[in-house]
Image (tube, rainbow, N blue to C red):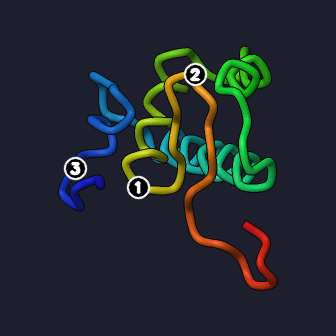
Amino acid sequence: MIKLDTNIDTILGRTEPASAAQVRAGLAITLAVSEAIREAGTIPSGDLYAALCGKMSLEGYQAMLRTLKGAGLVAEDASHLLRWVGPRLAGGVR
């Protein structure tokens, strides 16, 4: 789990402070990616990163996955298959 006092720059692996717009953009893409994983149920990490190439760096992608895994929403197995483990939505949809 992420500590509540953890700085967003530490979470994102940044050395410079993020602007408000960068934080909003980071949260928006993290939400979109988490929704994609949730809807898919499982997805190979490489396939997901390939779809995001040009939109974020590998380091940013890995930091985002660490955040989602640390929040208990996503699990990753040894073959890099991402699986949604977060809460189910009403109606039984994961």
Q: At 48% across and 47% down in the image, what residue appears? A: 68
Q: Earlier in the sequence, mark 1 or mark 2?
A: 1
Q: Secondary structure at mark 2?
A: loop
Q: At 31% across and 36% down in the image, what residue appears? A: 9
Q: CA distance from mark 3 to mark 2?
A: 29 Å
Position of the C terminus by quadrant: bottom right
Q: Which mark is residue 71?
A: 1
Q: Which x, y percent locates residue 82?
A: 62, 37
Q: Secondary structure at mark 3?
A: loop
Q: CA distance from mark 3 to mark 1?
A: 13 Å
Q: At 29% across and 55% down in the image, what residue appears? A: 1
Which label lies toward us, 3 or 2? Answer: 2
Which label lies toward us, 3 or 1? Answer: 1
Instruction: Identify which amino acid the numbered label 2 is placed on.
Output: Ser
Q: Which mark is residue 6?
A: 3
Q: At 37% across and 48% down in the image, what residue appears? A: 70
Q: Which mark is residue 32?
A: none
Viewer-side residue, 22 vs 28? 28
> Viewed as shown, does residue 68 lie left or right of 44?
left
Q: Secondary structure at mark 1?
A: loop
Q: Which x, y percent locates residue 40?
A: 80, 48
Which label lies toward us, 1 or 2? Answer: 2
Q: Which x, y percent locates residue 57?
A: 57, 16
Viewer-side residue, 67 vs 11? 67
> Viewed as shown, does residue 30 lie left or right of 53?
left
Q: Quadrant of residue 69?
A: top left
Viewer-side residue, 21 vs 82? 82
